[in-house]
Image: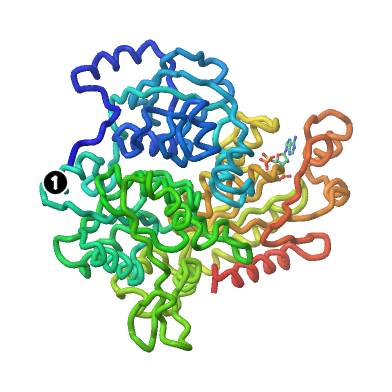
Amino acid sequence: MEPIRDLYLPAEDRPAAQSEAKDLRSWDLTDRQICDIELLLNGAFSPLSGFLGQEDYLSVCASMRLASGELWPIPITLDVSAEFGEQTAEGETIALRDAEGVLIALLEVSDNWQPDKAKEAELVFATNDQSHPSVHYLHNVAGPTYLGGRLRGVEAPVHYDLAQHRNTPNELRALFAKWGWYKVVGFHTRAPIFSAQRDLVLNAAKQVQANVLLQPAVGLTEPGDIDHFTRLQCYSAMLESFPEQTTFLSLSPMAMRLAGPREAVWHALIHKNYGCTHFLTGADHGSPRAAAGADPFYGATQAHDLLKDVAGDLGIELVVSPRLEYSEQRAQYLPQDELPAGETGQDIAFTELRRRLQEGLEIPEWFSPPEIIEHLRRKYPPRHEQGFTVFFTGLSGSGKSTVANALQVKLMEMGDRPVTLLDGDVVRKNLSSELTFSKEHRDLNILRLGFVAAEITKNGGIAICAPIAPYSATRRKVRDLIEPLGTFVEIHVSTPIEVCEERDRKGLYAKARAGLLKGFTGIDDPYEEPANPELRIATVEISPDEAAHQVLLKLESLGLIR
Ligand code: PPS
């Protein structure tokens, strides 16, 4: 198998690029951009020669093709801040660096433009609904300006984790050639492989008589997915039940977009570049999990339909599998339409699996070999053994600190997890003493507090936060930071402003009314009430002790305490 064209400079030209970069302006690549650039540089995103320019971008969004007509379904763009965009001229070369300042590549900027993000979302994700994680990312995380241009690669992004399980397309191509693997079926996943997926892959391998490449995505997947360290333990355990020397596991540093049908086409092209001859897709390929009660973003067969439409242009054979379900009568997994008459097949969806793990409930052996479930249970203990954050928000004088203190004592009495109280005033004194009460500084203050709460939550502790946190978008950012690590419980202390003002323990309302204190929350600075907090407490009607008890009941109903 021929090597694929990568975008790295020859080794002898790299020192010159390093010296050239010293005089260039630098852009520090975001986590997602680091994933994208690695796959651009190593050829996994072939035929792309860099971040998309405007013409290619518009064409990819509208028709899934580059301006040249080649099939390419996902816009791979370099988003930057408005300020950096304004400073960058077309024709300029910029240095792209990782978070530590290591030079990854030079970008010859050919295009600099402001995209219409709502239109991009509709075309690529078929929705502009921000509950789709990539639409949320597009509108709230990605910068407003896109830069496009050719890349000259200097150094691959470094991975300290699981480096021995990572391979470039050319490394895999060389291995397949060395092993005489002329037919390889590729399988992409972002979840552990359980019995259903194992059977799916083994059936496909038998059907086309090919070897297997398992290529789990470990760059950025959907928030809430199982972390890749745990997944690797699960994959290693599952590999034992694959026929020896027919299957290879290689981790892919890709940042998924969860674009459903377009995602499936993208994965097929990437697998081709990694040297696979066949690409296996099951049902619902590359889709986000639907929220409870919401419709899925994409129909179950939409990905298959689109793949079949473009099959002639893919350059890789498709192995399309229907959903497998467990038949108790036959004690095996079967395609839905082959189940014995009258039998309803069984399956455990990801959210149900998470629930069973969280509540320490049984997971049957037909679903997975027990060793794999043991790995998951060790990493994802039941909720009452995990860390969590209780985030009080409310006006100054609403009673947040009093209730938070009462809650802290009650949780400490339970004694099973360390408890940390991050009160607004305490955080201001210890973490944010240089900050003012401007919008920008309030956001920074809350993000700092959120960072500390996330660390506590990640390490199995309880963080109680009690700032004003007046802005919904910032509270949402803290929630997004914490939810992948543990539970986030938002509590609105909904004391009316008149009551807070009457209490006026610190005399700040009086000062604000007299115009001596500017930008005071509730007086001349806004407080955006939480629309859907986990709990709202009205401190006017109840004592702090009763309020803390209400919180405990909520925590108990969420399974966080027993
Ligand atoms: S924020 O908006 O979340 O960053 O506020 P926070 O860090 O919780 O700090 C709030 C405490 O600072 C005092 N203070 C003010 N609050 C609101 N607006 C203005 N301009 C202001 N200036 C000082 C106030 O005492 C808050 O304490 P609490 O405990 O909420 O009453």
Q: Residue at x 76, y 49 (%)?
A: 529
Q: Nearer the viewer, residue 354 or 490?
A: 354
Looking at the figure, which quarter contains the N terminus? Answer: top left
Residue 92 vertical position relative to residue 497 in the rendered view, above or below? above
Q: Quadrant of residue 113?
A: top right
Q: Nearer the viewer, residue 42 or 520?
A: 42
Amino acid type of disc 1? Ala
Q: Which residue is mark 1?
A: 177
Residue 204 vertical position relative to residue 481 in the rendered view, above or below? below
> What percent of the width, then of the height, locates residue 382?
46, 70
Q: Nearer the viewer, residue 475 or 460?
A: 475
Work out whether residue 485 can be spotted.
no
Q: Secondary structure at mark 1?
A: helix
Q: Nearer the viewer, residue 336 or 125?
A: 336
Please tell me in which quarter of the rendered image ligand 1 is found.
top right
Q: Quadrant of residue 97?
A: top left
Q: Residue at x 34, y 24 (%)?
A: 105
Could you tell whether 338 is left or right of 83 in the image? Answer: left
Q: Residue at x 45, y 51 (%)?
A: 309
> What percent of the width, then of the height, locates residue 313?
38, 44
Outermost front residue: 312
Decide: few, some or many residues near mark 1? Use Cα within 10 Å; few <14, some 14-19, many ≥20: some
> What percent of the width, then of the height, locates residue 290?
56, 61
> What percent of the width, then of the height, locates residue 58?
54, 32
